């Protein structure tokens, strides 16, 4: 199985900050990488698919990059509604494993 | 409106069984690979299972292989997850989710629509 490792596990930042979250796969997954946002008590929301494609309706301040084993999610200017937990997921092969999550908190 | 509605969760004793259902509406269900994802209380997301569009191929996480079975009925627009030999560590909210489908000639397995979740509690 492909293991997905996110860093950091938690992050404190302020409104307006630029934030980067990293995800590393245990083997090459090409660009088959997705990013999700989850708020407490809610289902996850797809932000980015295929490493860098923005899902419809997602603000352009969210961006994804990477290929192979190393990927990043960048939020260019944090907004109050962005404080949440973020997960990466590989969709290269089943089981389509998730990273352990990165909790983004207000500083 | 595209919607997924799970049902069938509840309290069950260790070793027991449950069948979860997910009713889909607002899209052509038979065109999409469907998945189950779970989340234990206070923990992260765990991919559990997926099924092909025709229902003839299923995939499971190692943690549930041999105990959980995914299926679908395209005539009823419904996805199922049969949970057998339940353990305390299976306690979680279970979400069904729809994959993105074909974009630009390729199939993408990102999960773009999620249900609200149904809770399974395994306890004596």
Image (tube, coloured by chain):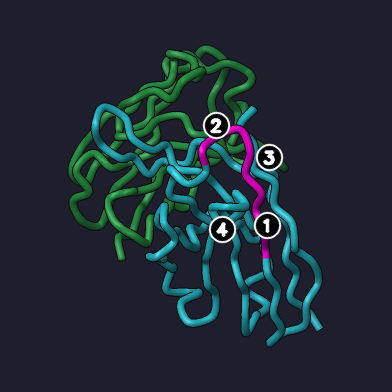
Q: Are marks 2 and 1 on the same chain?
A: no
Q: Mark 4 belongs to which subunit?
A: B
What element does badge 1 sit on? strand
Pick whichever, B41 or B50, lies toward us. B50
Percent x, y of residue B19: 68, 69
Type of secondary structure dominating the magenta stretch: strand
> Magenta segment, which residues?
B20-28
- Rendered hue of chain A is green
Res. A105 in view? no
Residue B23 among magenta residues: yes
Residue B109 among magenta residues: no
What element does badge 2 sit on? strand
Q: Is residue B29 left or right of residue B101?
A: right
Q: Which residue is mark 4?
A: B73
Percent x, y of residue B25: 63, 38
* Front of the two marks 2 and 4: 4
Query: Hey, which quadrant is residue B72 in on the image?
Result: bottom right
Q: Which residue is mark 1?
A: B93
Quarter of the image for the C terminus of chain B: give it: bottom right
Q: Which chain is cyan?
A: B
Q: Rate crowding at label 3 as few (under 14), some (14 to 19) or many (20 or more) other CA atoms within 10 Å.
A: few
Residue beneath the point at 38% across and 55% down: A96
Mark 4 touches mark 1? (CB < 8 Å): no
Task: Using the image, tell me which numbered label, if any, was put on residue A54.
Answer: none
* Front of the two marks 3 and 2: 3
Task: Using the image, tell me which numbered label, if any, was put on residue A12.
Answer: 2
What element does badge 3 sit on? loop
Q: Are marks 1 and 3 on the same chain?
A: no
Residue beneath the point at 57% across and 24% down: A82
Q: Which residue is mark 3?
A: A42
């Amino acid at each position: 199985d492909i293991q997905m490792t996110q860093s950091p596990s938690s992050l404190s930042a302020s409104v307006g900050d630029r934030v980067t979250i990293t995800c590393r796969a245990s083997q090459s997954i090409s660009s088959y990488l997705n990013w999700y946002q989850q708020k407490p008590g809610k289902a996850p929301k797809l932000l980015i698919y295929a490493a860098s494609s923005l899902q419809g309706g997602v603000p352009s301040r969210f961006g994804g990059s990477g290929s192979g084993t190393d990927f990043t999610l960048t939020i260019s200017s944090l907004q109050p509604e962005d404080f949440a937990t973020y997960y990466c997921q590989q969709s290269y092969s089943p089981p389509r494993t998730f990273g352990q999550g990165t909790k983004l908190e207000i500083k | 409106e595209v919607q997924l509605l799970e049902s069938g969760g509840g309290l069950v004793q260790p070793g027991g069984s449950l069948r979860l259902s997910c009713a889909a509406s607002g899209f052509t269900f038979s065109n999409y690979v469907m998945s189950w994802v779970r989340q234990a209380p206070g923990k992260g997301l765990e991919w559990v299972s997926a099924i092909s569009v025709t229902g003839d191929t299923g995939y499971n996480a190692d943690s549930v292989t041999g105990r959980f079975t995914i299926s679908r009925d395209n005539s009823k627009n419904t996805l199922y997850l049969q949970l057998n030999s339940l353990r305390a560590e299976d306690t979680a909210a279970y979400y069904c989710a729809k994959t993105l489908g074909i974009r630009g000639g390729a199939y993408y397995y990102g999960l773009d629509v999620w249900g609200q979740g149904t809770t399974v509690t395994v306890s004596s």
